[in-house]
Image (spheres, grey):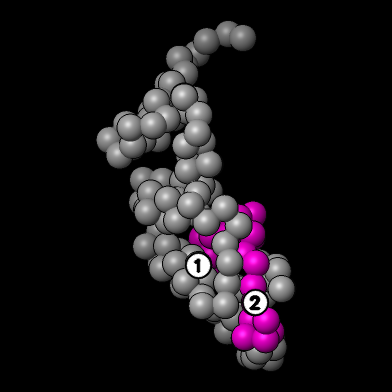
Amino acid sequence: MLTPAADVLIYAMTGENPAYAKAALKLLRSDHLLILKTVLCEVATTLKARYGLNAEQIQTALKTIAGLENATLEDAPAVELALLLQGPELDFVSALNLAQSRISVHYATFDEHVADFVRSRLDSPRVLLMPQGEQV
């Protein structure tokens, strides 16, 4: 089993450096893959920050990785839920955090947009919107 780093996946997807892309694709086809959640987060962040991809393009890229026949996803239920939740309103990293909190009673955030998004799509966990301007 092989666990690829984010850069291997990114070179394979973008082809930015043809030699690296070729080597990455060969490596990704050579063994069964374990795709870590942290690697998917790094891929999503890099595709947005460095390559300027939008939410839909990032979602497509991550679904492509997750759908590889020779891949196993770390915490597949959480990753799959995050891929469903991710979009213009909620980036993949936030969606994964939320998906991993599915066993919690509450999900706390200061972000009203995230709170509204979660309330409109999930029954659990319940959202705890933190009061803004409070002194701790």
The amino acid type of the residue labelled 1 equals Ala
Element at label 2: loop
> Any mark on residue 32, and which?
2
Q: Nearer the viewer, mark 2 or mark 1?
A: 2
Q: Crowding at label 2, few (<14), some or many (≥20) Cα neighbours within 10 Å?
A: some
Quarter of the N terminus within the rendering: bottom right
Residue 22 is drawn in which quadrant?
A: bottom right
User: Which residue appears at 64% of the width and 59% of the height?
Assistant: 36
Q: Relative to 18, is 10 above or below? A: above
Residue 127 in the image: state x and y as whole percent. Answer: 40, 25
Q: Is residue 24 visible?
A: no
The answer to if 50 sits in the magenta stretch is yes
Of 23 and 78, which appears nearest the observer? 78
User: Which residue appears at 47% of the width and 24% of the height?
Assistant: 106
Residue 61 in the image: state x and y as whole percent. Answer: 47, 69
Q: Is residue 49 left or right of residue 84?
A: right
